[in-house]
Image (spheres, grey):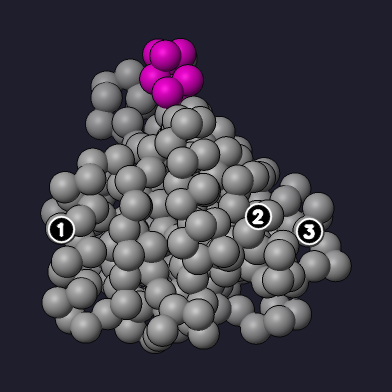
Amino acid sequence: MTEQKRIAVITGSNRGLGYAISRKLAQIGLHVILTSRNEADGLAAKQQLSAEGLDADYCVLDVTNDVSVQRFTKWLRETYGKVDILVNNAGINPTTKPEESSLLTVQLETMRVTWETNVLAVVRITQALIPLMQVHNYGRIVNISTEMASLSAISDDYYPLAPSYRLSKVGVNGITAILAKELQGTNILVNAYSPGWMKTDMGGDNAPFTAEEGAETAVYLATLPDGGVQGQFFAEMRKFGGPVQLQW
């Protein structure tokens, strides 16, 4: 069954936005690979999708750990022999800490841990999986960012300062732009997008939109046609009723 289907890996997909993206991709006929650090949570998410008749698999993955990424890559190569889509969703947001209200008070250790999880881990898993896209010259990479990472908008935006989270996503945007330049001339397309404020464990109950709504742009970018947009930063589609590019 999976030989003729696109294989989509979604990091941090046992809940929230990652799970919503996985579910939507499976609903349109892709074979999704759920990942999480906690095996029990990941297997429970896979069972939920399977109960809906959706095509899903699961493997433990800690994107911050070299050995875990190596094991995951080996499993993918031996089980599927390729990867078509990578959604870099796994991440942390420490904005609830009081010191996160200012760059003058933020703890450097908080910034370091956030950077390692949200930025270096994206590089680690992307480096590992791109060779599995290059074998058949097809790939779609979607990096989860935030409008808070738009440098051109910082002076007048209304978002929390949140220096650790905000700067880590500036890093994600930089990765997107650089990687897109390196992949020019190939059929591997990489883009970033902001899912907005959603009702998830990270976003809280007061958020105005659901994870399912936040997943819409990810699905659009994960299924771009050959020759599609490359190296751009998108807003959440619900705001405009379609894909709209943001300024870096």
Mark sitting earlier along the chain (3/1): 1
Residue 104 location (% of width, % of height):
46, 14
Residue stretch in magenta: 105-113
Q: Quadrant of the N terminus?
A: bottom left
* Circle 1 residues within 10 Å: few <14, some 14–19, many ≥20: some
* Secondary-structure class at tag 2: helix
Residue 38 location (% of width, % of height):
23, 41
Considering only vertical position in the picture, is 95 above or below 193?
above
| In this rendering, the label closer to the viewer, 3 or 1 | 1
Distance from Cα at disc 1 to Cα at disc 2: 28 Å
Q: Which residue is label 1 attached to?
A: 44
Considering only vertical position in the picture, is 74 above or below 79?
above
Distance from Cα at disc 3 to Cα at disc 2: 10 Å
Q: Which residue is label 3 attached to?
A: 183
Quadrant in the rendering for residue 34? bottom left
Mark sitting earlier along the chain (1/2): 1
Q: Is residue 184 left or right of residue 98?
A: right
Q: Which residue is label 2 attached to?
A: 130
Mark sitting earlier along the chain (3/2): 2
